[in-house]
Amino acid sequence: MWTEQSSSHGRPPGPTAKSPNDSRRSHRWRSYGPRRRRSERPMSVCIRMVATASPRSTTSSSTTDERLPCRAWQAARARSSRASLNSVSTPMRALAAKRASEEHEMDFRLGPKADEVRREIRAFLAENFSEADRRRTLEEGGGHDWDLYRKLAAEGWVSAGWPEEMGGGGRDPYEILTLYWELCKAGFPWIGLLNNGFIGHTLLALGTDLQRKEVVPRIASGEIAFALGYSEPGSGSDVAACRTQATRDGDDWLIDGQKMWTTTGHTAQYIFMLTRTSTQERPHRGLTLFLVPTDAEGVDVQPVHTMGGERSNAVYLTRVRVADSARVGEVDKGWAVVRFALGLEQAMGFADLQEKFVEDASRWALARDDEGTRPFDDPRVKEQLAQTAIHAEVSRLLRHRSTWLAAENRDLGGKGAMTKSFSATSYLDDAQAWTQIIGPAGMLAEGEDGAVANGAFEEAFRQTPVNTIYGGTVEILRSLVAEIELGLPKSR
């Protein structure tokens, strides 16, 4: 290391302006390393580098004046580097010793309890969920099967994540995460289970004593199920723009309006209904939640079939009368209830579906044809497979962070919105990229001749767009992240 910058001729430049008080000689150019003797022979570049390779001048490589070929120099430099690690004074040795004595690797596995859940669920599926059931689920697209749901309830899985003191199974968030991953991977109709888990959790946290006593146990036993009634025509992206009106009528409420995309509304007994009870407040105020029976007079449920193959519903409400005991939370303060329920939903993301997509894509890419070639040999396939796996892994880790916060009883903040936003957009991008690479064959559905990966790419292409809308659009979620996590002003 030199004390000053040398000139292009290898000598220091002369003084530019000598101070009258400066009687010292010009600076000599010197190295911090050992000074060469005049009798030493000129050294090659390799030997010069060996001489400065070690921080300790007493090593053999720093005192030799023997000419070394570059390969020998590299070996000497490696020995010198190892010698520096053995120095007591170097931080690297302390770190190496710490690594040797303790285990410091980050473990992203979910723990032995989650492993036990995985074994239990796989055994349940092997006994109760056949290939015929999977195909029927895919064809119907309703997201809920009463026979299968009641079998899960009988095993305690509907209420598995609720606190034990409130009649639940007391399973931690890691175990619940494993439950949904295994069901999703098997193609099980899990949307109804997910809705009921969220709503049961919400009622336990924010519901009345009567609701905890009468409604929650019926959810746990598999007797009743709920659908979500948030979205409306023209206000699906922003639930705060809700226009379905609830008006007091004595001790009851009368509800008028329309809901859209009410998945499982045709099989559920109740709808977790968001209404507007005041127009005098700001949009996020004046909202109230109700438990509305689907068989009540004035409720009309009509089917809506989506591009993704799902059966959703439009719900029309005309002077639907519900008791005040069906209200969840305080009047005009339903936004807090919605945020609690949506936070649970958003934190799930779509990592399960993405990981399954990676498995399907890998299986197809690595399979050899009759000539022995693989799609994986194409650099485009190789690159996209890596990108898809990276997206799935990031989504999984984001979800793990949200799960950890829930397990530690910490506020999710904007973490749930962040998880769903990234997961939904990356899954959509990957599905579209794969169809571009594969071409027309990638648009063939399961069961059609020539379908690639048994229709996995076609299914993902159809289903991923709606993921950017369910549970809050990506645009709304990004706004939440900006406001909550970054402290930026509201964008709406």
Image: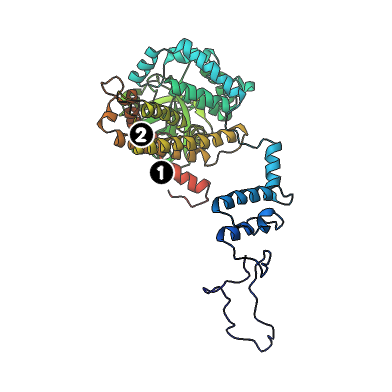
* Distance between the alpha carbons at the discs numbered 1 and 2: 38 Å
Mark 1 lies on a secondary structure that is helix
Q: Position of residue 257 (x, y in %)?
A: 36, 32
Instruction: Look at label 2 and name its amino acid.
Output: Asp
393 left or right of 204? Answer: left
Comes first in the chain, label 1 or label 2? 2
Q: Nearer the viewer, mark 1 or mark 2?
A: 2
Quadrant (top left, top right, bottom left, bottom right) of the N terminus:
bottom right
**Can you tell which quarter of the image residue 295 is in?**
top left
Judge whether residue 282 can be spotted in this image.
Answer: no
Q: Position of residue 484 (x, y in %)?
A: 52, 46
487 left or right of 441? Answer: right
Mark seen at residue 123: none
Mark seen at residue 377: 2
Q: Residue furthest top?
A: 127
- C-beta proximity under 8 Å, tags 1 and 2: no
The residue drawn where x is 31% and y is 26% is 452
Comparing 264 with 20, the one in front is 20
**Can you tell which quarter of the image residue 362 is in?**
top left
Q: Pointer 2: residues within 10 angstroms few (<14), some, or many (20+)?
A: few
